[in-house]
Image (cartoon, helix red, strand yellow):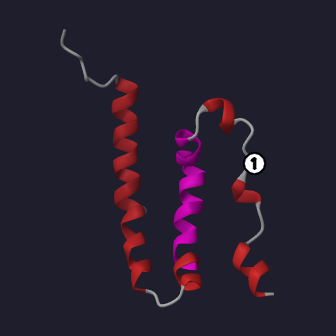
Amino acid sequence: MAIDFTLTPEQRELQREARKFAQEVLASATAAELLATPEERFLATKPIYEAMVAAGYLRRCIPAPRAARMPDWSTWPSWPRNFTA
C-alpha cells in the first residue's frame, strides 16, 4: 500500500511561512559563531529566539497539552543582565 505524502493546503502554507522565516531571520544566526565569548554569542542570538517565540514556532515544537502549561518566555527578565549584575 502506497503512502501519500502530499501536504494539505494548511501544511503547505506552514511550510512557506517557515521557509520565509528561515531566510529572513535564521540566516543571520551563523554570524554569532564567530564571536569570541559565550555571552557575546548569546546576546547575538537572543533576538532570533525572541522572533521565534513571537512567531509561535517554539509552541509548535511542544505537544499541545504541554504547551498550554508552558510560561510565556518572552515576558521573562533579561538573563544576561541578571548574571552580570
Q: Which residues are magenta?
A: 43-61
Q: Quadrant of the C terminus?
A: bottom right
Residue 5, relative to residue 58: is it above or below? above
With 54 as the anchor, is 11 left or right in this view? Answer: left
Kindly state the secondary structure of the residue where label 1 is placed.
loop
Task: Determine which residue is flagged by label 1.
Answer: 71
Residue 15, x across and y down, in percent: 35, 39
What residue type is disc 1 on?
A: Pro
Residue at the bottom extreme? 36
Q: Outermost residue, left direction?
A: 2
Q: Residue at x 75, y 38 (%)?
A: 69
Residue in the image at 40% along x and 27% along y? 10
Coordinates of residue 29 in the picture (x, y in percent): 42, 70
Residue 48 sits inside the magenta stretch: yes
Q: Which percent across, then down, holds residue 26?
A: 41, 62
What's the magenta bit mostly, secondary-structure-wise?
Answer: helix
The image quadrant where one finds the N terminus is: top left
